[in-house]
Image: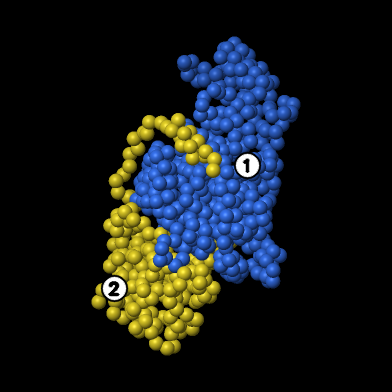
Amino acid sequence: MAEAVVDFPRNFAQALNNQQLRRNLRVAMDTMGMRRRTLFADLEAFERLRVRGDAIRQRALSKLPELLEQLERKCTENGIQVHWAETPAEANQICLDIIQRHHATRVIKGKSMVSEEMHLNHFLAEHDIEALETDLGEYIIQLDHETPSHIIVPAIHKNRDQIARLFHEKIPNTPYTEVVEELNTIARQVLREKFYAGEVGVSGVNFAVAETGTLCLVENEGNGRMCTTAPPVHIAVMGLEKVVERLEDVPPLLRLLTGSATGQLITTYFNMITSPRQPGEKDGPREVHLVLLDNGRTKIWADPELRQTLKCIRCGACMNHCPVYTRLGGHAYGYVYPGPIGSILTPQLEGLENAGAMATASTFCGACEEVCPVKIPITAILRRLRTESYRQTAAPNAVKGHGCKRNLAESLAWQGWAFSNATPWLNALNATLLGLTGSHLSKLPQVGLLKRWGQSRALPPFASKSLHALAKEKGISDE
Amino acid sequence: MSNARTNILARLRAAAQEPAAIPETVSLPGEERGRADPVTQLKRLLENMHAEVLVTDRRSWIDTLKDALRPRGLNGLLYGPAGPLGPTLEANWDSGLPPLVGYTQEVEQCKERLFALDAGITSTKGAIADVGALILWPDVNEPRLLSLAPAIHIAVLEADKIYNSLADAMVRERWAEGMPTNALLISGPSKTADIELVLTFGVHGPKELIVLVLEAV
């Protein structure tokens, strides 16, 4: 599913100039970072824990085909119906078929990034099915026809005044209030009726355990439990990388997830679903479906370095600590997954020709890697994506859209640069000439790349002597 | 259905690499073995998350429960008559207390009532001290919505079933050998921080969680 063409420079400029957004983000990101640091105050213990988390995710990925088959087998034994989808379109169709088979028109949804990746709500709306988001943050942005700007706190770009106005305008008979508790109560009242009347519940999956065929869901609000308990049918959608091997792999990952995401020891609810309603049981869905989505993940998996992208447990810590994300928010990135993880995942899913620019939204400060609970080498993968943008290659694991940025002028320029640097007399001449002019970059004609580069930067003067000459003067031998 | 399954697995098999040996620590690190006794630790963590914790014992818990309920003026208490708490509740209930409502029918027959009740009471399978959470395995006698639909959830926990950690509970109770339809960890009343990260309690799930911890007499 291709998004509209994303104009990154325009998005970035808009986000940076939006003072309200900057303030909202600043407060929120600082708070989330602080909560996380408080929880993982013992750095040694945290390091041990994330070494373990990394190992668990690596082991699961190393056995991915076997674990997916085992998960399917165990789920099927338990009565959960497993579906496979190569593309979002296939996954959407699977969901639609299930919903229509039950003649349902009211779907209630728990938070799921994969369903965002599928654009499921939009697809269902086209078939006259109401898919209502029930997570408070998701509910807020759905009311305003927006997408999540953060994978954990999707409405973090909005402040209470904006939400107060939204509720007042969009929910009938709702007085204007900026009191957070009252806003919360309003949402509770609206959504309880929806839980009561929902015909199909849709959720994501945080971990799927191959050993037992168990789907694990992490949440605080109770809407996830509602969506997976109250309606007669439950559809869980998951990216196929979310499988883990054993039940005992879950506790360390759970601790890493809740601690990294929100600085919590544990969320209010940890919901483990292993089967539909059994004979004699009085509630719970009579049908549970699991949709396994590929959407390019098997291609990512084929490359040992890129595969590390799939270790992600979607905690969002990389966003909260990224100097780029914390100034832009998620919408500027233009795709479902923003921030550092989005910048490595999205170009691989959507192709470098579409989303390659996301890999440039980084200062390479490495904060994302430092906080990543499963040690994803984010900067190495960013570099790889940037390099592949310029490299045409026949390698089977090359990222989709590789070489898309390559052009003749630039290739020639770099070849010239290489030649001049590898040719001592030419190099010396260049250095002398530039130094002699007493030149300042700002005195050169401001066109093209130099103009863009100089728009928001102070351009430096050339040194009067080259590094080469300086080194010689200092008596450093020319090795 | 398409050939999605075949294609996906074929792609994975074609690209399969030699699995690298990944060193893994044997035990879960970072588990704080609290010096506090498990009841104190659990109580502190649950209370941090706005649960009300009443430490009582196996003989007098029903009185503790009645004292807690009497001033609240609730419209009813949902329970499982055939569950472990059913007989004690029925034998000791008096007037002046919210009427006992048995969860005896399938949800399709009683959904409206479930969603309108003020309180529900369940037993627990245990608790986890290091993070402060209750373990619930709903079953035929104590269904899933019992701890979710009513506005107040009352949970009864036997103090000797408090495990140090989730990993500890899983291993000692051999969860992997047979998981129930639904297993839950619950660490407080439902909450959200989705508006400006302001923590507020009582969203879609229960607004209050009352935990009765039963110590041996």
**Colour convention:** by chain
- Identity, as a three-letter code, of the amino acid under mark 2: Glu
- Chain B drawn colour: yellow
- Identity, as a three-letter code, of the amino acid under mark 1: Met
Which residue bears the numbered disc 2?
B215
Of the 4 image quadrants, the one containing the N terminus of chain A is top right
Residue sitting at x 38%, y 59%: B180
Which residue bears the numbered disc 1?
A1
Name the outermost residue toward the bottom: B95
Q: Position of residue B141 (x, y in %)?
A: 38, 70
Residue sitting at x 60%, y 43%: A89
At mark 1, the secondary structure is: loop
Q: Position of residue A376 (x, y in %)?
A: 46, 40
Q: Quadrant of residue B146?
A: bottom left
In-front residue for pair A18/B109: B109
Q: Decide: is A261 above or below B216.
A: above
- Chain A drawn colour: blue
